[in-house]
Amino acid sequence: SSLTGILPSEMGLMTNLKLIQLNENELTGSIPSEVTESLTQLTQLDLYYNRLTGAISLETMTKLEQLRLHRNQFAGLVTLPETAPFKVLALHRNKNLTGTIPLMLCDIPDFKIQVCGNGQ
């Protein structure tokens, strides 16, 4: 794909949205707080292979099953929802990410996780 620019904060107005797939583009900037705070029905967030930056703050997205944010330039604190029914969590190949992975993820059968920082 060839989308460029930032994620518009107006995406947060689509409160019934369940899926975002904007992977493999040239998107820059951070994920707007209007998006992370309002899209509480989201089950899949695919923004991998972009140029997104900033921290990852998704604690209100409690229905997320698939989160793919790998191969961006995210750095800093990662805040994930403690009760989300994750099946896929991919955060690898970003900058220096910090934070904790919810312990409940260890109890999910067939859960797939890829979390490495520093370009790994």
Image (tube, helix red, strand yellow):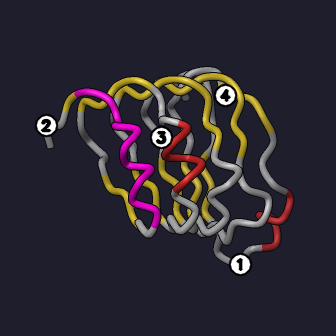
- Three-letter residue code for mark 2: Ser
Can residue 8 be found in the magenta stretch? yes
The disc, 2 or 4, on the residue closer to the chain's N-terminal end is 2
Q: Are marks 4 and 1 in contact (CB under 8 Å)?
A: no
Mark 3, Cα crowd under 10 Å, few <14 / some 14-19 / many 20+, is many
Nearer the camera: disc 2 or disc 3: 2
Measured as percent of width and height from the top left, residue 36 is found at 56, 47
Residue at point 55%, 29% (across, down): 120
Instruction: Looking at this view, name the residue that lies furthest to the right.
Output: 103
Identify the disc placed on residue 109: 1
In the image, what residue occupies the spot 44% across and 50% down? 12
Q: First in sequence: mark 2 or mark 3?
A: 2
Which labelled disc corresponds to residue 97? 4
Of mark 4 and mark 1, the one earlier in the sequence is 4
Front one among 8 and 104: 8
Instruction: Return the residue nearer the eye: 31 or 107.
Output: 31
The residue shown at (61%, 28%) is: 55
Query: In the rendered view, does 53 fall on the left or right side of 108?
Result: left
Under circle 2, the secondary element is loop
The answer to which image quadrant residue 40 occupies is bottom right
**Residue 31 coordinates in the image, percent (x, y):** 48, 36
Q: Seen in the image, is 79 located left or right of residue 48?
A: right
Query: Is 102 situated above or below 78?
Result: below
- C-alpha gap between disc 3 and disc 4: 11 Å
Tell me residue 10's x, y (percent): 36, 44
- Decide which of 42, 71 is in the foreground and name it: 42
The percent coordinates of residue 6 (x first, y second) are 32, 29
Q: Which residues are magenta?
A: 5-15
